[in-house]
Amino acid sequence: MSASIINGKQVSAEIREGLRQEVERLEKQGFTPGLAVVLVGEDPASQVYVRNKEKACHDLGYYSEVHRLPASTTQEELLALVDKLNRQENIHGILVQLPLPGHIVEKAVIDAIAVEKDVDGFHPVNVGNLVIGDDSLLPCTPAGVIELIKRTGIELSGKHAVVIGRSNIVGKPVSLLLQRENATVTMCHSRTANMKELTKQADILVVAIGRANFVDASYVKPGAVVIDVGMNRLDNGKLAGDVDFESVQSISGPITPVPGGVGPMTITMLMQNTLIAAKRLQGLA
């Protein structure tokens, strides 16, 4: 019997409807959340992401600014723009699309974004608050992962969760968020010995390594929740996750597809972060 599919598109649509209603209520008070997105260069994937973010703002009634800069933009010029946006009262969230051209130090740019406007959740202060359990703007993809798991109705407390991947963008923060939900967390990575022995103990398996179809059924405990964060373009042009969906679906519990699983949640959680940041900056939180 096939596992149930975790429909990220549907969950995303439900959350966005709630955001849309909240924005309409705020507009009646004369207030509109604002998001600024900065794109440096012409990376094709980044251009798609930025267009999708711009569309989400339009659909939800947010104020949106998109700053498209040439790849030749200097670090000083980019930091000057970030500083301007930090001080701009109608902008409540700032996102600088990564990756940046090689001559720009990403950390310097992330550090320059005002903590209260860091809707990506990458600023060291927000990361530190996440680590110690204080309130912070959460990284979007990890927050979306937790939301999807909760929507399955599975109780996270006391469960054994295994995360494959230790990136600063997904692996590390999602492990912290799982611990916040009182799960017991094991992290696996490229140097982990006997990985299958660990993953087959997982009640919840989160895979974020960027290797197409890496995890097959031999890695998965029957009935486990499987969250596939991977997004890989195959030689035939099709998208594939880090999980071999057909193989794993035959034994797993609820599982996310690619596309249509975690992907739709990332921009939705960005929109949620922007609304949270806006309400805090306006003293409405």
Image (spheres, rainbow, N blue to C red):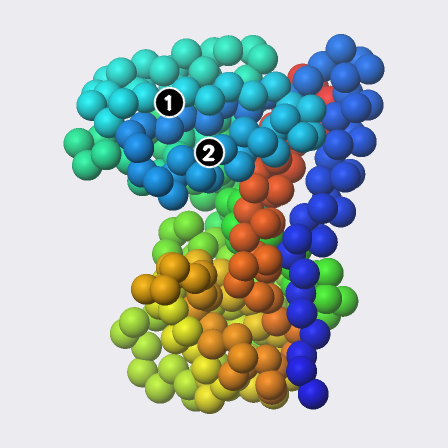
Residue at mark 1: 68
| Residue at image location 55% in from the left, 17% down from the top | 91
Instruction: Relative to 256, say whether 30 is above or below.
Output: above
Mark 1 element type: strand
Q: Which of 204 and 41 is in front in this view?
A: 41
Mark 2 element type: helix
Residue at mark 2: 50
User: Could you tell whether 163 is left or right of 25 in the image?
Assistant: left
Q: Which amino acid lies under the numbered mark 2 shown in the image of this protein?
A: Val
x%, y% of residue 245?
52, 75
| Residue at image location 35% in from the left, 40% down from the top | 44
User: Could you tell whether 20 is left or right of 194 in the image?
Assistant: right
User: How many numbered markers are drawn?
Assistant: 2
| Residue at image location 67% in from the left, 65% down from the top | 6
Q: Few, some or many C-alpha atoms within 10 Å of disc 2 (few <14, some 14-19, many ≥20)? A: many
| Residue at image location 37% in from the left, 22% down from the top | 68
Q: Which amino acid lies under the numbered mark 1 shown in the image of this protein?
A: Arg
Can you see residue 279? no
